[in-house]
Amino acid sequence: MNRKQKKNLVRIILTAILMTALHFVPSEGAARFCLYLVPYFIIGYDILIKAAKGIKNRQPLDENFLMAVATAGAIILALYSGSGDYTEAVAVMLFYQIGEWFQSYAIGKSRQNISDLMDIRPDYANVENLGKLEQIDPSEVEIGTVIIIQAGEKIPIDGVIIEGASTLNTSALTGESLPRNVKVGDEVISGCININGVLKVRTTKLFEDSTASKILDLVENASSRKSKSENFITKFARIYTPAVVGAAAVLFIIPSLVTGDISTWLYRALIFLVISCPCALVISIPLTFFAGLGGASRAGVLIKGSNFLETLSKVRTVVMDKTGTLTKGIFEVDAVHPISTNCISENPTEARQLLHYSAHVESYSTHPIAATLRKAYPSENDGCKVENVEELAGLGICANVNGNIIHVGNEKLMEQIGAAWRPCTKIGTIIHVAVNGNYAGHIIVADKLKPHSKKSIDALYKIGVNRIVMLTGDIKEVAEKIAAELKIKEFYSGLLPAQKVEHIEKILSEKSFAVAFVGDGINDAPVLARADIGIAMGAMGSDAAIEAADVVLMDDDPMKIYTAIKIAKKTLEIVKENIYFAIGIKFLCLILGAVGVANMWFAIFADVGVMVIAVLNALRALRV
Amino acid sequence: MKKSYKIEVDCANCAQKMEDAANKIDGVKNAVVNFMTLKMQVEFEDGADAKSVMENILEQCRKIEPDCEIYF
């Protein structure tokens, strides 16, 4: 609570006590009037002052003015009719203030909650100066500076580790609690927390270009991109208040001229003034979006604007890239088939020998497949002699291992050296191995599915997505296999990036519902931009993805696509509830007030009660 | 030129009115008030002097909501 909130709370409590006390004190006439003015001024003095300022500044439809007129009117009416019932007027003011207080408190709290969730802003960077550690403002650190991150500290700026090894907690960025191990040479991104060990990092970016700053910027600006629902409410509020005030005037003037009963119709008109405040509407819709965006960022889903949250909730078609999105994008050895096994069973000893040779031969290559083979045979430093390594461009590689000439490569290489290679029944990239010119067998490397791919496709179908399309630059056989495994009916293979855009355009023209594209952001930026909603995956460190997409998934788990859509749907549902509920109750109370069923207490509920309920409902969007 | 300013205002409707008022000031191309983050983003017309424009904005906003504040 800030000072203003504390002060107002004291005023509210004081007024409530006074009102209760006055209820038991019998008083009449002028004395009663004066007694009730005390709590009225305690609770309402600022409103009355603001109302006066509003008149001076020609802002007659200001809420303070409306409240002042409604309550002062009720007091005058009580005085005029001789009923002496001043409770209503004070109560309206009291409840109005309670509503304002609650609104300010709830919003302050949710602001705090959301900024706590996004607590990735680093406060300082440690720089070594003359053998001593110095804490400096991270925005002053230049590219290439060596910064030191101690255990428990946040990494302030993106960079590369030059000394030390540690475990990083990335949960503030990804929503994932699994820690990540890092060592010398690894890139680290700002916002992660160093759990143990001291790291020396050479910065590769400026503070403002670092991941943490970019993400914060994105989240803070997200709610400035207003959605259609917000624009609707703004427009509605603009006409709502004048319309209700106008209706109040009509309600007072015409019937009282006709019937001559001024006090009844004045009372009903005052009810209108209390209901005319648009605050419940104006606050609850942006708050819902804000909470939704906050809840999403906690789950590791960054949504760049309320408008995108809205579109995301309408997604019925999801188009997905294969490599890096559904599959890991990293090749792994799938099977090893020595010549003796006919591609069916595996012979462990011979298979090991085959891997052994190929790992040695590939030990000097930088090709991605070479890394895969080396990884599959970790005990490489076994004292074997590897000589005369020769890379044969477009074919493979050849080397002398322990006196044997080993060729590792594709079919063309085998044909060139005259080895009788065999095709394989398995689908993937096939690497053939020949020893001294004789065919020894082959190794199949394939991109593996991510562990949650299958589950995420099922979940998407369940949440209302009715069409899932896979696009890939990979060959048809591989695409077919992956699509079958994931039960994706529609896929297009062998596509160049430009052809992916063509496909997206075709899908967009067929559908009236929103189309989302999910990619890893590496070479599909144009497609991300073209779709109704571009979802980029695995944004940890990829600037291109953050720039091009509307939604950024902080890690590469495909389940996050489901999470994003689920959050969007829930948020929009709450938005709808709030719009219907708030407008509905207000209109109902207006009608009941006009016919004389609803009294001032109803009106307070229509104003403050509705706002409190709408705000509480809005905060549900924060919980994912 | 686009700039972001921190603001202080109590109610959402007043924030909305501040946005409307800011958009009517000469030299403002587009202004967006974000009540949730308490920020006002102002896109200025080419050649407009940000400081004097902001002074005008604050003056108009004060007429609507005497309590409001814009830090520039």
Image (spheres, rainbow, N blue to C red):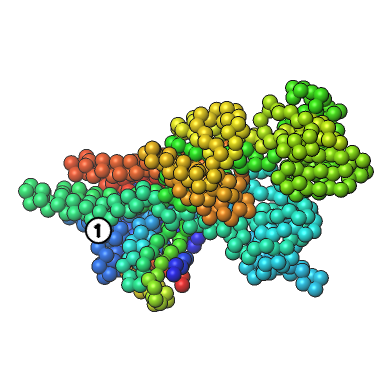
- Please name the residue shown 37% across and 39% down the image: A512
Is residue A155 or residue A5 the one in the foreground?
A: A155
Q: Is residue A456 above or below residue B49?
A: above
Q: Is residue A417 left or right of residue A498?
A: right
Say few, some or many: other residues with alpha carbon within 10 Å of mark 1 (under 14 / 14 to 19 / 20 or more): some
Q: Secondary structure at mark 1?
A: helix
Tell me where residue A387 appears, x and y as whole percent: 88, 47
Q: How many badges with numbers are in the image?
A: 1
Tell me where residue A190 appears, x and y as whole percent: 65, 57
Can the viewer see residue A616? no
Tell me where residue A236 appears, x and y as whole percent: 29, 51
Q: Is residue A256 left or right of residue A454?
A: left
Provide the chain ID for the residue under circle 1. Answer: A
- Please name the residue shown 50% across and 44% down the image: A499
- Please name the residue shown 29% across and 41% down the image: A584
Q: Is residue A478 left or right of residue A575?
A: right
Image quarter of residue A450: top right
Query: Amino acid under label 1?
Result: Val
